Image: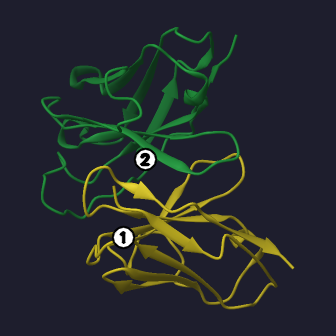
Chain colours: A yellow, B green
Amino acid sequence: DIQMTQSPSSLSASVGDRVTITCRASQSIAKFLNWYQQKPGKAPRLLIYAASNLQSGVPSKFSGSGSGTDFTLTISSLQPEDFATYYCQQSYNTPPTFGQGTKVEIK
Amino acid sequence: ELQLLESGGGLVQPGGSLRLSCAASGLTFSSYAMSWVRQAPGKGLEWVSCISNRGDRTYYADSVKGRFTISRDNSKNTFFLQMNSLRAEDTAVYYCAKNPLPLIPAAPVYNWFDPWGQGTLVTVSS
């Protein structure tokens, strides 16, 4: 199975900050990488698919980049509604696997 | 609006069985593969199983293979997860989710989970 490792596991940030989350795959996965946001008690929500494509309805403050083994999710200006846990997920092969999550908390 | 609604969760003893259902609306259900993803309390996301649009191909995580069975009824826009020989480590919120493709080919493919249902809690405990 492909292992996905996110860093950091948690971070504290202020409203208005630019936040970057990293996801590393244990082998090259080209651009077969997706990002999700999950708020407490809620289902995950797809933000980015195929590494850099913004899902319909997702604000443009979210962006994704990367290919191969290293990927990033960036939130350009953190807002109160963005405090959540973020997960990456690879679809290069089966089983699809997720990173362990990055919890974004209020500083 | 595309919507997924799970049901069937609950408390079950170790070794017991449970059947989860996921009812879909707002989409051409028979065109898409569908998946189950679970989340143990306080933990991350784990993919469990996927079924192709016609139900002729199924995929399972090693952790559930031989114990769980995924199926679907396209006439009722519903798919299922039959869980047998349940263990404490199966305790989780189970989410159903839609895939963008009719199946998952062996080759690398752009595949994701969207949307997700609200989740149903399965607790395995004596």
Q: Nearer the viewer, residue A8 or A58?
A: A8
The CA span between labels 1 and 2 is: 26 Å
User: Which corner quadrant holds the C terminus of chain A?
Assistant: bottom right
Q: Amino acid at mark 1?
A: Leu
Q: Nearer the viewer, residue A25 or A38?
A: A25
Secondary structure type for disc 2 = loop
A80 left or right, relative to A59 = right
Say which chain tag 1 marks. Answer: A
Quadrant in the rendering for residue A96: bottom left
From the top left corner, tell me how far across and down residue A70 is, in percent.
41, 83
Question: Disc 2 marks which residue?
Answer: B1
Q: Is residue B68 above or below residue B63?
A: above
From the top left corner, tell me how far across and down residue A32 is, in percent.
29, 70
A50 left or right, relative to B105 = right
Quadrant in the rendering for residue A74: bottom right
* Residue B121 visible in image: no
Question: Disc 1 marks which residue?
Answer: A33
Residue drawn at point x = 37 percent, y = 20 percent: B67
How packed mark 2 is, by other alpha carbons closer than 10 Å (few <14, some 14-19, many 20 or more), is: few
User: Which corner quadrant holds the N terminus of chain A?
Assistant: bottom left
Residue drawn at point x = 45 percent, y = 76 percent: A24
Residue drawn at point x = 35 percent, y = 61 percent: A2
Please give the label number shown on residue B25.
Answer: none
Say which chain tag 2 marks. Answer: B
From the top left corner, tell me how far across and down residue A84 is, in percent.
69, 64
Q: Amino acid at mark 2?
A: Glu
Q: Is residue B9 above or below residue A39?
A: above
* Residue that lies at the very extreme toward the right in this rendered image: A107
